[in-house]
Amino acid sequence: MVSTPRTPTLATAGIVLLAVTACTPQAQPAPMPTVSMACTKDSLSTQTPGRLTIATDEPADPPWFVDDKPDNGEGFESAVAYAVAEQLGYARDDVTWIRVRFDAAVAPGPKNFDFDINQFAVTEERKQAVDFSAPYYLVRQTVIALESSKIAGMTALADLRGAKLGARVGTTSYQAITDVVRPTAEPQVYNSNDDAKKALQNGQIDGLVVDLPTAFHITGAEIDDAVIVGQLPQVGTPEAFGLLLDKDSPLTGCVSAAVGQLSSEGILKQLEQQWLAQVAGAPELT
């Protein structure tokens, strides 16, 4: 992995966007630019002046989006996208959605969007080709089980202590079992998620621990009678999702600042609770 140029801070972004003020010996130094001076609808260099173009894949799957309609504001990532737009001064009617395939978005080259939201994990390799905002979501580890399992419907970590759990070897999922759940039975480890899913289906384990996006896919598309028991407290170094922008985009600093503001105000957590824990049925296990 290689390091990439540091994403400009909000203050730096503002300085770049403002003209340098010349001073005479008697003049006072120019005031430090404020957020509103640097990161507003009128000052941002977007694909279309006065509008924000946001991309995602097709289809746009739940629970990140609802009914494959990114513009309806429903689903976690649609809601996050509109929240970021609002922070930057764009009304819903100022937002245009386009569809871009995942592989095309992360590939090098100019982009036809201002930012893309599509569960992009931030990696050093990808940062060589594109920019990322500050993280809007830290991936949680999640317990899934068959509907007939004794742990289906359980709501507390303590309820899982007597369960036989499994995970792929060497993963954060396994670490979540040993460090967070700490079951009385030795965790089962598997060389692949396919092996782990077979063990779950065959009743060899009570529950399987995977990351939340994988849990949604398994329960929604792969195992008909599998359900999400709940999300575990954060453990280890979680995978982070960021908004994807063109490499060296002039918007990166402002978009990151908007995400950071939403995080500090607790809005991202509220959206996570609403669309992932409540609507999508992935409650937090405490």
Image (cartoon, rainbow, N blue to C red):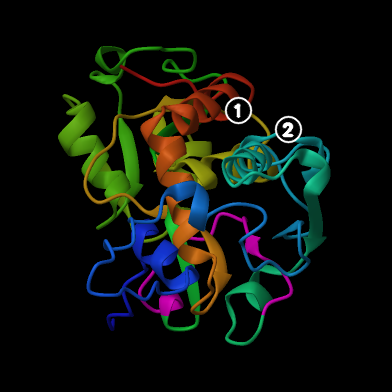
Q: Nearer the viewer, residue 18 or 45?
A: 18
Vertical relation: 165 (above or below) 48: above
Q: Amino acid at mark 2?
A: Glu
Horizontal and vertical percent position of residue 118? 62, 56
Query: Label 1 vs label 2: CA separation?
Result: 8 Å
| Secondary element at image label 1 | helix
**Which residue is tagged 2?**
74
User: Is residue 33 found left or right of 47 in the rendered image?
Assistant: left
Question: If the image is split into quadrants, where does the C terminus sit?
Answer: top left
**Which residue is tagged 1?**
275
User: Was residue 112 drawn as part of the magenta stretch in this picture?
Assistant: yes
User: Was residue 125 drawn as part of the magenta stretch in this picture?
Assistant: yes
Instruction: Say how many tags the image has.
Output: 2
Q: Nearer the viewer, residue 150 or 128?
A: 128
Q: Residues within 10 Å of mark 1 (few under 14, many from 20)?
A: many
Horizontal and vertical percent position of residue 214? 52, 47
| Secondary element at image label 2 | loop
Q: Quadrant of residue 231?
A: top left
Horizontal and vertical percent position of residue 43? 61, 61
Q: Residues within 10 Å of mark 2 (few under 14, many from 20)?
A: many
User: Is residue 60 found left or right of 102 in the rendered image?
Assistant: right
Q: Nearer the viewer, residue 24 or 218?
A: 24
What's drawn in magenta, residue-wise? 111-127
- The answer to the question of whether label 1 and label 2 lie on touching residues, with beta carbons closer than 8 A, is yes
